[in-house]
Amino acid sequence: MLDNVRVLTWQQDRREFIGPMEKEQLMLTFLFLMLGIVTVFIIFVVFYMIIGHKTRDLGLIKSLGMPASRVAAIFLGFAAIVGLIGTAIGMTAGCLFLWKINAMENWLYDHYGWRVWDRAIYAIDQIPNAIEWPVLVCVAAAAVAACLLGASVPSIQAARQSPVRALQVSQI
């Protein structure tokens, strides 16, 4: 009688559903990692261009005696402000979107008969929309850190720039 009895955990019993979701989670993690790398590169390019346009100004303030560390701090402070403002806007928009996602999906279904999440696969009646505050804080900190990382190399290059070379007539 006990030959046909199997003892399984809930994870083993639902492996055909959990496996694809774990793969989706891994792919999303990889996607966001690549997005983060691209973001750092874009910030690098933007700050490199900003500093390139401020060559004469940098030469002037450095010739007046501003230390290199202060020049770097100015650009890193600017990067931090940009990162904080962008993070605040992104967090606000993301939270609003998350709070309204079920209403938006219901509207899409009512008007077009289209569901974002297939209820048969995910076995959910609503899209999960709870905000995980520790995760949100980590993402916000990573966004500001990415902005600072992307701006660090151009800021250091600006700080090391020679005032004589920056003020040359051929550079203007």
Image (tube, rainbow, N blue to C red):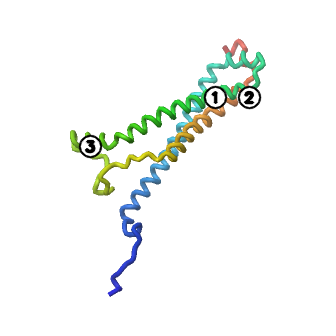
Decide which of 13, 31 is in the foreground and name it: 13
Residue 123 in percent (x, y) is at 31, 57
Closer to the eye: label 2 or 3: 3
User: Which residue has dot 1 on it?
Assistant: 77
| Gap between marks 1 and 3 measured at Cα | 44 Å
- Residue 69, which numbered label? 2
Contact, mark 2 vs mark 1 (Cβ under 8 Å): no
Q: Which element carries disc 1, helix, strand or loop?
A: helix
The three-letter amino acid code for the residue at tag 3 is: Asn
N-terminal of the pair, mark 1 or mark 3, is: 1
Amino acid under label 1? Gly
Q: Secondary structure at mark 3?
A: helix
Name the image quarter holding residue 114: top left
Indicate whether 149 appears above or below 26.
Answer: above
- Identify the residue at horizontal 58%, vertical 34% (top origin): 147
Looking at the rendered structure, the secondary structure element under dot 2 is: helix
Residue 39 placed where, x, y %?
Answer: 53, 37
**Residue located at (46% from left, 47% from top):** 132
Q: Position of residue 121 (x, y in %)?
A: 31, 57
Q: Residue at x 69, y 19 (%)?
A: 58
Check disc 3: other Cα within 10 Å, few if <14, some if 14-19, many if 20+.
Answer: some
Residue furthest toward the top? 169
First of labels 2, 3 by sequence position = 2
120 to 135, vertically: above or below: below
63 left or right of 13 in image: right
Mark 2 is on which residue type?
Ser
The quarter of the image holding the C terminus is top right
